[in-house]
Amino acid sequence: VVMSATEASAFGAETFAEGNWYHELLEDGLALSYRVEEVLYQGASEFQEVEVVRTVPFGSLLITDGLMQSSEYDEYVYHESLVHPALAAHPNPKRVFIGGGGEGATLREVLRHPSVEECVMVDIDGDVVNMCREHTPFYSAGAYDDKRARLVIGDAKEGLANEPDASFDVIIMDLSDPLDGGPCYQLYTTDFYRVLSEKLAPGGIFITQSGCASVRDAHHVFSPIHHTLKQVFPKVYGYTMCVPSFTSEWGFNLAVKDVDQDLSGEAVDETLKARGLDMRFYDAISHRRMFALPKPLRTLIENETRVMTVDSPLFMCDTSTHQGIYEDE
């Protein structure tokens, strides 16, 4: 039996017993399959369908609208790569903003830094936040209960606009990929980045996840996001890391207001030690690997001319072909 994620949800979790498979159709001719041990949650919020399934290769997977968002076994690679290059580069990060990040892992990583006095997290989907707190607590690891955390359920663009100018040392966008018809594509545009830049304090750092970034697919949004940010910020750094469950190098773009900011990573180990931090993944050597882009990506960035605007957006993939389906044996 093969069915869409929508049809699967209607049958309830008991339909998918041990031995079933979840197939994620990445593009025409390419799919990724996971053996499902247990369906932990299936439901729909106001904005999206949400599922949590326990798989053999990656543990629990968070899936929204048929697209895998993160996995239990390697989420730390993604979240440490997203958060710590920026937090470690800032000499004294006190106030941090997170857009998205509903599972809570980005908040968890930010709050590991003892200098952080407040972290404002704005996510549009409160149902996903509550579901993750109940069914995947390993993501947040108690971060939502930290007195330094301020959770706002709402639109990230509006939430950031309502904050005072020049008030954040670091801004992190942990959003879904820009998809046609999705809720997030406007948060990858010059229009939003100009608003965002005004919210950064002097010496502030901005970081955004930027989609697939292998030599095969970095042209979809990784290099356009990089070039779009260059229209707003004086210095932009692209970097990547392999996240096994994503089956790709994953891209990030980091932008600074101070061109003299040190992003070499030479002081990372010293900084982490001074803050009492011992990462599972991120350190100075990992930092150098992340920022050492291969020649095809460097060439792609150098030659990129596309700029993402509200009127001329770019999208990660064709949502009509990128979807999830279940199959029982």
Image (spheres, grey):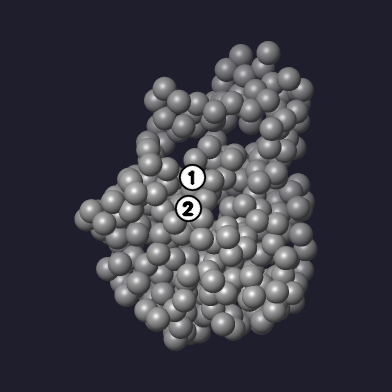
Query: Which amino acid type is shown beneath numbered disc 2?
Result: Thr
Could you tell me residue 85's position as x and y percent?
A: 54, 67
**Res 14 seen here:** yes
Instruction: Say what secondary structure mark 1 lies in.
Output: strand
* Left or right: 285, with 292 as reference point: right
The x and y percentages for residue 282 are 62, 60
Looking at the rendered structure, the kind of residue marked 1 is: Glu
Residue 8: % across, % down: 62, 27
Quadrant where the image shows the N terminus? top right
Quarter occupied by residue 100: bottom right
**Residues under numbered marks 2 and 1 in contact, where contact means CB atoms less than 8 Å apart:** yes
Give whichever of 309, 303 is nearer the camera. 303
- Most foreground residue, 301 or 30: 301
> Residue 199: image x %, image y %?
44, 79
The tag earlier along the polypeptide, 2 or 1, is 2
Please indicate whether residue 316 sits to the left or right of residue 290 in the image: left
Q: Which element is circle 2 on?
A: strand
Q: Residue at x 30, y 55 (%)?
A: 301
Residue at position x 46%, y 32% in the image: 26
Q: Estimate how packed mark 1 is, as few (under 14), some (14 to 19) or many (20 or more) residues with alpha carbons within 10 Å.
A: many
Mark carried by residue 240: 2
Residue 28 falls in image quadrant: top left
Residue 192, placed above or below residue 105:
below
Image quarter where the C terminus lies is: top right
Looking at the image, is 188 positioned above or below residue 48?
Answer: below
Alpha carbon separation for disc pair 2 and 1:
6 Å
